[in-house]
Amino acid sequence: MFYLMILFFVLGYVAIALEHSIKVNKAATALLLGVGLWVMLMIDAQGILGNGLNEKFREFLGCNPDLLNSQGIERYVKFVVDSQVLEFLGEIAEILFFLMGAMTIVEIVDQHGGFKIITNRIRTRSRVKLLWVISIITFFMSAILDNLTTSIVMVALLRKLIDDKHERWLYAGMVIVAANAGGAWSPIGDVTTIMLWIKGNITTGGIIPKLFLPSLVSLLVPLSLLSFFLKGDFPESEKHLLEKSHSAAPATRRERHVIFVLGVGALLFTPVFKVVTHLPPFMGMLLGLSLLWIFTELMYHRKHEMDEKEKRTVSRVIKNVDVPTILFFLGILMAVDALQTAGHLTLLSQWLDKSFASPYPPNILIGVLSSIVDNVPLVAGAMGMHEAVPVTQAAGSLANYAVDGSFWNLLAYCAGTGGSILIIGSAAGVAVMGLEKIDFMWYAKRISLLALIGYFSGILTYFIIVG
């Protein structure tokens, strides 16, 4: 059963990668994969946990000596159900509640036209200048919001500015690169950095100084190269000022500004909340959501003349949150946790340690692989292979695995920016591909090489910074 779990995981992963071909949503496959692996583990718990790969199982028996003499599989059931499942569920729930809160806040701001405060200020007609403006805005917005949401907002903007489909694809390709680069240096900019941050592998004060410049270089290098191929301005007929949304926002200009400030402020306040209160980050996110919720409820309470169906309250807006994406994360994280409990990740860790003297090659490999498969399970797997060592206990080779150590910082960079190499390698890429119907091979020919050059340029910059 131990090896069947590997086969089942690989088949599930292939099904996720071929989502559009087999016409099965990846969230459904991920949930089947997550639950299925735990079922397989329980069917042969005695054989799998008896292989000695799980140190926590030995510690569990040491803390529960009464189970040493238990008959049958009672000790294994107790360990898996009472210890592992509940422990992992708590960690997963922190990530999911954080994502739900963040996605709801962003949706509220977007529904009330808050992002127009930024997009309405873009007026340039120059092809090169527009490319730089769009890319830089995307880079910083994705660090504050997240790369998925930012890419969706910027694609909507590009549709209002550029008529020609293939020319718009070029800008959309750079939006993917910029969104992933911007998300890599912020603890809330990408799901993978959120995972590392919530687990305590990285801190806000550690990741930003070390990864900002490498992430910026990974964008500026392809951006500069692409600029050589763009000439002139957009024709007057194709240059659009940003028009008002087709459905007018149900808020005044002042209310829209307040919602924008409250929403973005809630996202920015979350790291501060964690430092000040020492509580999990999702609580800070939910606190921000509650304040924004209260403001919008009071705002609509004063609008007696407005039809109830036109009021974009949180209870209505929350229905637009991408629940399948949240369920996908739930399933894939459950699957990785099952492999960690069974000992597969321990074996993989031992193989990597024997094969590579430095912790850097595995991270670079993870970054390249993240262009083919989703980076969430790759990062979750890496987190399962190694524990973050407290700084006071980090000495010698363990220094790389200390909190804010080189292994974790480079993992955040590689997993985030490596997904830009292929359009299917990141949530931002998949979203833009779906919105713009960008052809896979078109992206591979026009953007992939630029993204790959930027990826390795950022790694080189990181090595220079850390010495």
Image (spheres, grey):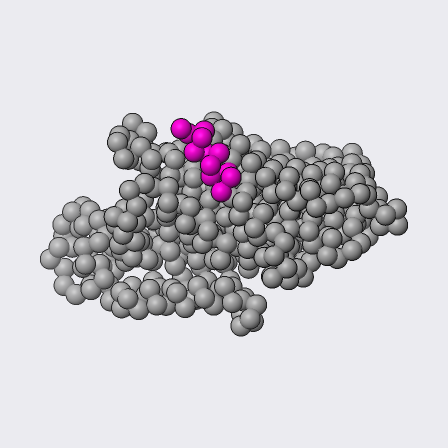
Q: Say if the magenta span includes residue 43.
A: no
What secondary structure prevails in the magenta region? helix
Can you name the residue that lies furthest to the front here?
A: 228
In this view, 47 is above or below 153: below
Give the residue displayed 84% in from the left and 43% down from the top: 241
Give the residue displayed 43% in from the left and 66% down from the top: 12
The stretch in magenta equals 456-467
Instruction: Pinpoint residue 381: horizontal percent, then vertical percent.
Output: 37, 51
Does residue 266 appear to the left or right of 35 in the view shown? right
Does residue 227 appear to the left or right of 179 in the view shown? right
Locate the N terminus by quadrant: bottom left
Can you name the residue that lies furthest to the left here?
A: 69
Can you name the residue that lies furthest to the right here?
A: 237
Residue 217 visible, this orientation:
yes
In this view, 464 is above or below 173: above
In this view, 215 is above or below 342: above
Give the residue displayed 54% in from the left and 45% down from the top: 453
- Where, by quadrant of the figure, is residue 393 drawn? top left
Can you name the residue that lies furthest to the bottom here?
A: 22
Instruction: Pinpoint residue 50: horizontal percent, then vertical percent.
Output: 18, 59
Q: Nearer the viewer, residue 50 or 183?
A: 183
Instruction: Pinpoint residue 430: horizontal percent, then vertical percent.
Output: 59, 57
Total numbered circles: 0
Residue 281 visible, this orientation:
no
Instruction: Pinpoint residue 216: horizontal percent, then vertical percent.
Output: 57, 35
Locate the C terminus by quadrant: top left
- Where, by quadrant of the figure, is residue 303 drawn? top right
